[in-house]
Amino acid sequence: MGFWKNNWRIFLITLIAITNLIMGLLTTLGLIINSLLIYITNFSLAILYPIFEMLQRMYENNEIKEVNIRGWDKPKEDINVLKEDVAVVKAEVLEQKTKKEEKKKENRILIDLMNNNVISVRTLDNNILDKRFISVLCYQAGFSVKNQIISQNVKDEIDKILLSKKIKSKKEKLREKGLDTSREYHKMFDDIGFIKLANHNEFYIIPEDNIYPEKLRNLDKLSNYLIKQGMIIVDEEWNKLKEIHKKHDKEFYQQMQNESNPVNFNMLIMRINRRDMRHRFILRNDFNKKFTPELSAIIKLSEFKTLASEKVAIKTIISQSSLKILILSLPEKEREKVLSLEETFTKPQNEGGLGIKNFYDYHTKDVEDIKRILRIKFKKSEEKISKYAQLIYNNSRDYKEDLIELGINI
């Protein structure tokens, strides 16, 4: 490992040079197909170089950690102490979770504009190039007969359900039969707020600024916390497997009593700069609907830079937008009922309306006047009337402030 870390550049450059030499010779000899294959290989090596360069830099700066979590082999009392340590930090995580949620609400306008394809993914990306992220890649040994974690009898029972064409909800059926062998370690990432990216079964990521408590932004402390949680989860997974075999294969269950816990999984924990991620993240569509709010939460709206064409598009969508943009959080049926009153809201006041011209003007009206019109459709529910009126009022005010902060003249 040490040799590779110190000499990979020499090895890779030499490989590229040899490839170029062979490619030149093949071209001279007229072997076009072989030459094309070598060219493709050469191109691939050129892409690998910056990736290796990035990994090398992270190793040198202690920004990448390889972790192997194995089954618990200490006295039961020790794991109870471990659980107490984890519980203390976990309580802090949950206590401070609202901080990130508040940040997301502050920049909700960015999410809405992106969902309406007004602000592009590339514009968002260009605004976060200097932001840092923590990512975790999990790669684990599965539960199999080969590694003696599950028995052949249990595997056969599981396969019978999974291969059945008659069973609609196979996961539910496995749980019902007490045969659920799914892994549980994703829970520890969910607690902190990691997002599991699309197209990556076991790749989790979070902007560093969105990690709370802030002490977990230190890679050593975060790794230590994840390792402790991982050890507890691995112990729980082993106990779950024992229960499955106790019910479905008692002979194998007896053998398990004399074995140490074989369950394990590995993690590669990295601190990554957004610039290092660009070549892959955009191509693989990692800007999914869960991840976009995470990204918007790390941007100051007043510093967000949009293209001139996007500002024009934002103004256009503002002029075309209706009450709907303020009530997107409502269930569809409720939303339709409120929207049916939009014409009344826009009528002049002397005709029983509020004289609303733009969707961000509702907060200039009295909440009681908004309630009066909502009563037309929600006569029997004062609770809904109050809730929806306040929602329209608050969102109208917030949107206007956000638009001004974004540099949009309205």
Image (cartoon, rainbow, N blue to C red):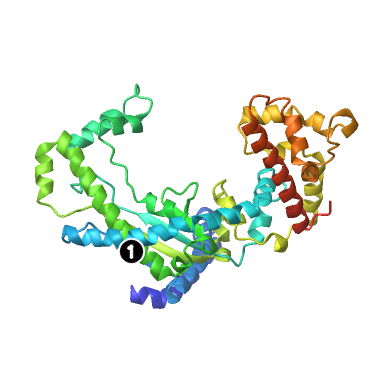
| Residue 318 x %, y % | 79, 44
Residue occupying the point 39% across, 70% down: 220
Position above or below: 4 against 207: below
Decide if residue 381 is on the left or right side of residue 174: right
Indicate the quadrant where residue 334 lies: top right
In which quarter of the view is residue 295 placed? bottom right
Q: Residue at x 72, y 47 (%)?
A: 118
In the image: residue 387, left or right of residue 340: left
Q: Is residue 355 above or below residue 409?
A: above
Residue 385 locus on image (x, y percent): 67, 33
Q: Position of residue 94 (x, y in %)?
A: 44, 55
Residue furthest top in the image: 166
* Residue 294 visible in this rendered orientation of the protein: yes
Residue shown at 30% from the left, 34% from the top: 175
- Give the structural element (helix, strand or loop) at label 1: strand
Residue bearing the label numbered 1: 67
Label 1 environment density (alpha carbons within 10 Å; few <14, some 14–19, many ≥20): some
**Foreground: 148 or 41?**
148
Q: Quadrant of the N terminus?
A: bottom left
Q: Is residue 73 visible?
A: no
Q: Residue at x 74, y 27 (%)?
A: 340
Horizontal arrangement in the rendering, residue 75 relative to residue 62 (left or right): left
Q: How many marks?
A: 1
Q: Is residue 52 left or right of residue 77?
A: right
Residue 345, how many percent across, how many down? 80, 33
Q: The residue under label 1 is which amino acid type? A: Val
